[in-house]
Image (cartoon, grey):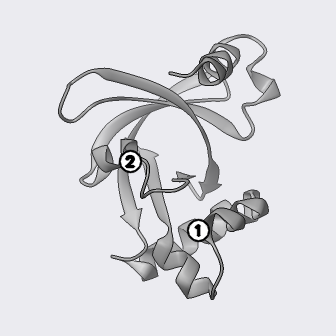
Amino acid sequence: MSFANACVATLLRSPFHRLLSGSTDLIRYRGRRTGREITMPMQYAECGSDIVILVGQPDTKTWWQNFRTERDLDLLIRGRWSPMTAIAVVGADDPAAIGPLLDAYLARFPRAQRMLGGGTTGDRARRAVIVRCHPR
């Protein structure tokens, strides 16, 4: 974990978590190949009872591939760990399913649209990857 991520993780675990808890969570899961526990901070948005995490630059990131099939993880949100199940929704594979998830994320973080590049809304949705987490 980078120094910046370690600082964010420490703050989220502390009594001062409210400074970031409204937009940032910690995800904790076991790597699918290594079995190693991985913890890292992510920005999140709520979509009903689900938590959605937009994967920035999914072509260069690998963590989200742990969730190509549904898997368990824990989320630290607002100072409390919650057991969740997560699955990656890939816009190119399922543009209809990613639409409402992406809308919820972009409503919370409108600037994130820049990460998705130009083109139509459909073009951006096809390039997006979202990890959808729902309570176990």
Identify the image quadrant of residue 23: top right
Look at the image and tell me in which quarter the C terminus lies: top left
Local SS, label 2 = helix
Q: Nearer the viewer, mark 1 or mark 2?
A: 2
Tell which circle, 1 or 2, labels the residue nearer the N-terminal end: 2
Image coordinates of residue 76 in percent, x first then y, are 56, 27
Identify the image quadrant of residue 83: top left
Badge 2 amino acid: Trp
Number of the label disc, if any, that sits on residue 19: none
Q: Is residue 71 left or right of residue 127?
A: left
Local SS, label 1 = helix
In the rendered structure, are the residues bearing label 1 and label 2 in contact, judged by CB atoms less than 8 Å apart?
no
Q: Residue at x 45, y 56 (%)?
A: 58
To which residue does mark 2 refer? 64
To which residue does mark 1 refer? 102
Q: Residue at x 74, y 11 (%)?
A: 15
Q: Residue at x 27, y 31 (%)?
A: 31
